[in-house]
Image (cartoon, rainbow, N blue to C red):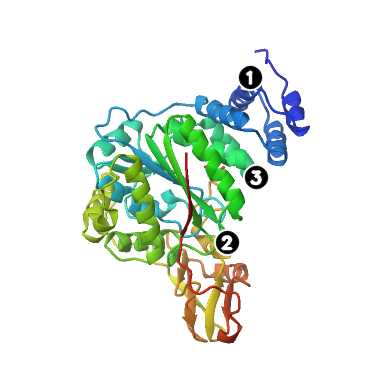
Amino acid sequence: MTEPFDAVDVIRTKRDGGALSPAQIDWVIDAYTRGAVAEEQMSALAMAIFLNGMDRAEIARWTQAMIASGERMDFSGLSRPTADKHSTGGVGDKITLPLAPLVAVFDVAVPQLSGRGLGHTGGTLDKLEAVPGWRAALSNEEILAQLDDVGAVICAAGSGLAPADKKLYALRDTTATVEAIPLIASSIMSKKIAEGTDSLVLDVKVGSGAFMKDRDRAGELARTMVELGTDAGVRTVALLTDMSTPLGLTVGNALEVRESVEVLAGGGPSDVVDLTVALAREMLDAAGRPDADPAAALRDGRAMDVWRRMIAAQGGDPDAALPVARHTEDVLAEADGVLTTLDAYAVGVASWRLGAGRARKEDPVQAVAGIELHAKPGDEVRAGQPLLTLHTDTPERFARAREALAGAVVVTAPGELDGFAARERTVVLERVAG
Ligand code: URA
């Protein structure tokens, strides 16, 4: 086959700060998916995009080309509206687990096509696989049947959805080109638009544990994704939420499932409950259910009922005991004072080193590994009190996990608290709508 463009010319255009034409974009995505553009050429192009950016028209076309690389799902045959949530990834971010069944209580179908963790952020599928018997891989027919019956499904995105993104994401991960706004926005939105949801709520994380460390860049990412969704006919809203410290009191697969079940039972840490309810309200509003009361459905057990049916429908046993680590070690407070820093990124890396995450996508994860938090920023602590408990089945990992935590836990003496705002529990920082 004769190719209409030369990959080197496309790379040179972007390297020199030019805009790619629609035809160049369509070709380069298609040719890369079929293997006619080599990995080293795409990695050079990704780096040129990282350095020189893309304008709005380029990002929209790039997203469309990635959608066109695969299949589109169709939920239009369902009797209820669909709403989905996507998080840009954080530490202790288990929100999908209570959120999907919670929104389904109100007769909204929630198709959560999710991924696995890579690097310091956890993956929803890895978390749910801690539930004995639970199965992540479903066919499109099984997804539709479960949405019809239970209303919520959390499962692996099939290989047919935006295959160009799957290839490109793996390449970006190994070439330091993940944190580029055009590439993140097109990656996330191509999958969500191809999935065919009616409405989408984006949870854009800001802070040390997020891809976007600063608020301005996170805001730009949120606005870019909201525009892409809105232009594609998907009702899209984004919340900018805090990821400077982990969400909740657990990080790691089985530990996060345990905490999610506490939230579904009407308890759980307030930041997890608040964010779950805030995202549920946005999804329910977008799906035409503005009067729904998600907080009540957590308290009265309706969300728990849907959770149990959702887990059972995928072979999981909602009553089975979750696995527990064979080894634990505590990290103690060194002095009396107030916990002023508990850095999300460091806790994520430590949890990963304990075995909760993977370095390569084919690595296994330990369901039991992770970290329990006994205090959050703003809490008063006493010298010798456990601040964290590290969990793993492989105790030789403790030393490296402790190294990751060096400098990440700061206790400040009461007299030296100048500049530390008293306990600030606001998780939602800003709302971005189309
Ligand atoms: N999540 C994605 O799906 N893609 C990105 O590029 C970053 C986060």
What is the distance, in whole Å, between disc 3 and disc 2 at their CAs? 19 Å
Q: Quadrant of residue 153?
A: top left
Image: 413 above or below 65:
below
What residue would you read off at disc 1?
23
Secondary element at tag 3: loop
The mark found on residue 174 in the picture is 3
Query: Considering depth in this image, is 311 or 292 the residue closer to the camera?
Result: 292
Q: Can you see residue 159?
A: no
Q: Quick check: 186 left or right of 249?
A: right
**Image coordinates for residue 342, horizontal then vertical, percent:** 54, 70
N-term-proximal mark, 3 vs 2: 3
Amino acid at pointer 2: Tyr
Label 3 or label 1, whichever comes before in sequence order:
1
Residue 182 pos. (x, y %): 61, 38
Q: Callout 1: 10 Å neighbours few (<14), some, many (20+)?
A: few
Residue 79 x, y percent position in the rendering: 24, 32
- Using the numbered discs, state the Cα–Cα distance from disc 1 to disc 2 in whole angstroms: 40 Å
Mark 3 near mark 2, Cβ–Cβ under 8 Å? no
User: Around disc 2, counting alpha carbons within 10 Å, would you say few (fewer than 14), some (14 to 19), or many (20 or more)?
Assistant: many
Is label 1 in a helix, a strand or a loop? Answer: helix
Determine the quadrant in which ligand 1 lies: top right
- Residue 219 visible in the displayed image: yes
Q: Which mark is residue 345?
A: 2
- At a point 55% along the width and 62% down the height, the residue shown is 244
Whether disc 3's CB lies below 8 Å from ligand 1 is answered: no
Q: Quadrant of the N terminus?
A: top right
Given the image, on which type of amino acid does mark 3 rest?
Thr
